[in-house]
Amino acid sequence: MDTFVLIGGGLAGAKAAETLRAEGFDGRVVLIGEEPEAPYERPPLSKGYLLGSDEREKARVHEPGWYEAHDVDLRTGTRAVGLDATARRVELDTGEWLSYDRLLLATGSSARRLPVPGADLEGVRYLRALPDADGLLAEFRKGGRRVVVVGGGWIGLEASAAARTHGNDVTVVEPQPTPLYGVLGPAMGEVFGRLHREHGVDLRTGTGVEAFVGSGTVSGVRTDTGEEIPADVVLVGVGAVPNTGLAEDAGLRVDRGIVTDAALRASAPDVFAAGDVASAFHPLYARHVRVEHWANALNQGPAAARSMLGQDVSYDRVPYFFTDQYDLGMEYSGLGGPGDSVVCRGNPDDGEFIAFWLDGGRVTAGMNVNVWDVTDPIQALVRSNRPVDAVRLADPDVPLESLA
């Protein structure tokens, strides 16, 4: 009987296990999760659950009992500490060596730490796991708290919206000229900056953090202007780092993620990677791409499972993510570049529009804000890789389908 071992108890690993059984694999499936929790999705941590609108259990990938019912050996609270790719076995922190016929590395990523004085003070929080969200939600629900968010990325902005919704005072400290500057550029980043200021957030762009201050427990954030911002709660959201240590120690090829081909095969025989940790060759872009968003884990886990089964797999989905902040809902498809020009269909000041990123007249990405049911044609435009007339692209009377 073949044994397939899946390391990583997040969405990618759980969906891989589900797909193996759905595709008829009747061998042994072992799913190793470092967290004590059963596999869950991460978007609710900064969205519905943190807002208090969704129950904690809604984040679960599967209903209780699913793993036993599908004969998946789920081992939570267990960490893989070694990989011998030659002998095809994994060492667990329990001391057990687990042999495999196929191995999936879906080890995800960890919150990037901010290396400044006071970083170890109690109350300096990160948001990556369910217990992190539990603690933040408990604080936010008190209301009237002084919340300082370090970093104007997706996690920071979504958490800021949740904190404001619960009635807290929020200050965001971001070193770039706008929130989301590196992802969306200045014009679209300012859309989100304006949104948060309109909802009472003290947004301080062009401002860095020098230190966290306090006696045992954090009580403030000192910026590079010398100002000290009082804080009851501090959340640091400055990005994530792929968990590649196991692969690196085993001698697998790692370059800003575990390097794979389009079939999600890593550099060692019968080893695959998926989710946040995978830097996979993407046929659409003809280069390796690492995507940290939910949709990538949702779709790449099953693709890796099919590849493990020997099916013909070429993972070429257009990257996609979404966010909900206050009354703004957004979907983004593609990979826009820093040098791309931006064309808008609709007026961003009106709150409903689509923004397109263009490189050489070709659509590299599209972002629909409070405009729905356009993801498919936007992705078709990205996938077509053909020059588009910018005037027609901006014209709401021209169907997007006609431009792809």
Image (cartoon, rainbow, N blue to C red):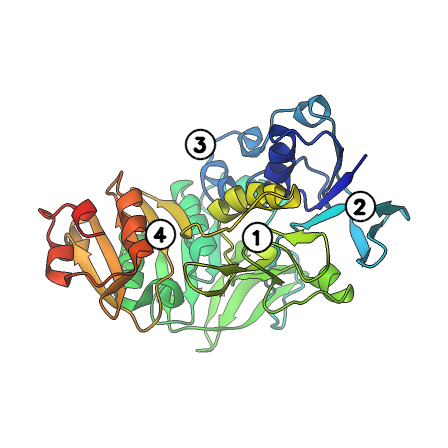
Give the residue type at disc 3: Ser
Q: Local crowd at mark 2 within 10 Å, few (<14), some, or many (≥20)?
A: many
Q: x, y percentage for residue 7?
A: 71, 47
In the rendered image of this protein, does residue 121 appear above or below residue 314?
below
Q: CA distance from mark 1 to mark 2?
A: 19 Å
Q: Residue at x 46, y 63 (%)?
A: 151
- Upstream in sequence: badge 1 or badge 4: 1
Q: Nearer the viewer, mark 3 or mark 1?
A: 1
Give the residue type at disc 1: Ala
Task: Name the one closer to the observer, 209 or 57.
Answer: 57
Q: Nearer the viewer, mark 1 or mark 2?
A: 1
Residue furthest to the right: 95
> Which of the labelled discs sits on residue 263, or is there none?
1
Q: Local crowd at mark 3 within 10 Å, few (<14), some, or many (≥20)?
A: few
- Upstream in sequence: badge 1 or badge 2: 2
Report which residue position mark 3 lands on: 53
Query: Is residue 95 in view?
Result: yes
Q: Is residue 199 left or right of residue 16?
A: left
Q: CA distance from mark 1 to mark 4?
A: 21 Å
- Indicate the secondary structure of the residue bearing disc 3: loop
Q: CA distance from mark 2 to mark 3?
A: 41 Å
